[in-house]
Amino acid sequence: MPKKITLLLLLLLSLFSFSQEKVTLSGTISDIKNKETLIGVSLFIEETKTSFTTNEYGFYSITLPKGTYTLLISYVGYQTSQEIINLTQDIRKNILIAETSQQLDEVVIIQNNKRVDIRKPEMSVNKLTIQEIKEMPVIFGEVDILKSILTLPGVTNAGEGQSGFNVRGGGADQNLVLLDEATIYNSSHLFGLFSVFNPDAIKDLKLYKGGIPARYGGRLSSVLDIYQKEGNKNDFHMNGGIGLISSRILAEGPIVKGKGSFVVAGRASYAHLFLKLTNNPNSAYFYDLNTKLSYSLNEKNNIYLSGYFGRDVFQLSDSFINTYGNSVINFRWNHLFSDKLFSNLSMIYSDYYYGLNLDIIGFNWDSGIKNYNIKYDFKHYLSDKLKLTYGINSNYFDFNPGKIEPTRPESGINEDQLDKKFALENAFYIDAEHQISKKIAITYGVRLSSFLRLGQQTLNTYANNQPVTFNPNFLIYESAEPIGTVSYGKNETIANFNNIEPRFAISYTINDDQSIKGSYNRMSQYLHLISNTQSPTPLDVWAPSDQYLKPQILDQVALGYFQNLKDDKYSLELETFFKKIKNRVDYIDGANLIANEAIERVVLNGQARAYGLEVLFRKNTGRFKGWLSYTLSRTEQKVEGRTPVETGINNGDWYKTGFDKLHNLAVVANYKWTEKWRFSANLTFQTGQPVTFPNGKYEYEGITVPNYSSRNEDNLPAYHRIDVSATLTPRKNKKRKWEAEWVFGIYNLYNRQNAASITFRQNQETGTNEALRLSIFGIVPSATYNVKF
């Protein structure tokens, strides 16, 4: 009898094991027309309520018990589809989906499905497809990547005419901007007028403001991850646009039909040519080039080679020429070890150059930063409940703080090369995405980072190891005089830092349309942007952490509520956040940053904090679409005295940073009137930038001298404007092989004279002090003719 029971139990266990035998469904999802893979496509298994997405290379994988399943596929700008999958063994299924204007015979069009965004433990993340960006108002003749993210909650800029962007009160140097995984150090052309990203060459972007995965590191505030198009694998196509300020062209097509493709895109501005017609000796222009090659060696191996080159030139007659720009190249190899293990190896080179030709003085100034990066990443789909992401990263930096070369013998300037600086940053990370239950999903991971500040360099030494001293008589900070030097040989370690950076996020699904999410992340930043402006300019200098410039460390927590309304026609996101930063650099009064070989003599380490509430409300469907975003936040900094005698900055109290914007409102509206006409508009309103104004005056030998208030105690007037655009798409002639459209835009519709700065001077006639308000842009109309063939 016991033997029969044992045999029965073994039989039941065998049957249970067989019923639970699991198989893997994997593959890629691509555009049906050009065979280009799609990033972040949402997939949902109806029977198990399991959601997942394609990775950065369009690959997906899920492991399920044998059976028949309903697979729902949705992607912004594409037809949402449904497929019935009969899983009896491991299946590799590559799926093609069509844009909304195309028709598919193989799939059934169904209602849009956004459950994946509700259920995933991903928050403080904003995604924009290039289709969404192209529906936004055109500014200066073309859609703009950076201008589009400025309409998202928690994202601002420092003002017109200034490049970069600020996220949740962080500095522009605290954003990690990646183009095909390569670092972009300056993301703007013409001091913020255009972004360096040609919209024709961009496929997808994602902005992380918090809850940042462990695979990213090296910056504190955000990650802007942008991928270029791979190119059409089937047919050759060209498209471009001719505008009043700039023009662009893109060519794409197959290298080997169905297996490989190329993309080449170029862009240039030429508004400066009109100045020459008026004998104006000044000019400002830019040009850039995007390239990408992709090739599928076989079903398990793909290779990519992508690059970007851009330059800006700003010239005041022949006496001042400023040239700056990015150059990047990246070779990547995708390898599929199995249906559950995906890998990517990247070898990346980034170079940011900035130079000055000062003929009026008689010298050239060249400086920049280069980095050589190798990274190996793995995505391991262990089961339908658990996925691992892990990898290693090594980054070597070469800093050139400045080289001076005389251009005329009579200038009296000697050639000089400031000591170059070198550093090595290494990291290992692991991340897990874990579906605990139908309602609870979590991600957790850790990044282990190390930073070596390397020789060859000679450094100053100071009394009491303090490069900045305090003058108790005048209550001011001053640069200390060196008492000696110490020399380091090539690759000798000057300073060494190690940090553990945990990451965690959780999502609780209330129902199919509502969820609550929370996140925590710690980040380390070993690079510092030495600048006394509000955003990166060509005169900014990057410097590595050392014994005086300590690494910046951030801790951030966030809590959010997310809801889809009326069958996903509307969506609502509410988030609140708090973050604090250690070792945030600020400068002593009167700091000289240019050609300063001992930058530690003018900087002080402090701390910063930011907190706020973000609201994003979207209308997702219909002829009228758009969103409203609002941020209420505060960003502050504090530099306390190092001894009881020292006053610190602002007496050691908290003061607003240059990036503080209490109110930030953006409204974006798109309306498709007919098949021929589409209209767009956006409203921007921000609290004015913090500044320091005089609060009194005194006279010295007949000259009126202003006395200034505490640092950043005041604000510029509120910034606001409205941009509008209209797109005319003529009905296509069936005999014609090309498609065309006209795009008309108006930047700053009501000609608001927003203050870029307010300076104070003494009136030469009256002798009184007066305020001078500088505005850069008023109303700017534009027109562009786009063509595709």
Image (spheres, grey):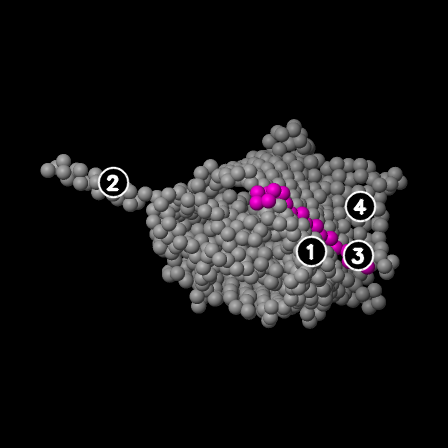
Q: Residue furthest left?
A: 1
Q: Which residue is mark 1?
A: 240
Q: Residue at x 21, y 39 (%)?
A: 10
Circle 3 — which element?
A: helix
The answer to which of marks 1 and 4 sits earlier in the sequence is 1
Q: Which residues are magenta?
A: 255-274
Q: Which residue is mark 4?
A: 357
Residue 78 painted magenta:
no
Can you tell which mark lies on residue 413?
Answer: none
Amino acid identity at mark 3 = His
- Cα distance in 3D space between marks 1 and 4: 34 Å
Q: Which residue is mark 2?
A: 14
- In the image, residue 744 above or below residue 47: below
Q: Residue furthest front?
A: 735
Q: Residues within 10 Å of mark 1 (few under 14, many from 20)?
A: many
Q: Which residue is mark 3?
A: 272
Residue 271 painted magenta:
yes
Amino acid identity at mark 4 = Asn
Amino acid identity at mark 2 = Ser
Q: Residue at x 53, y 56 (%)?
A: 98
The x, y position of residue 38, in whole percent, is 53, 51
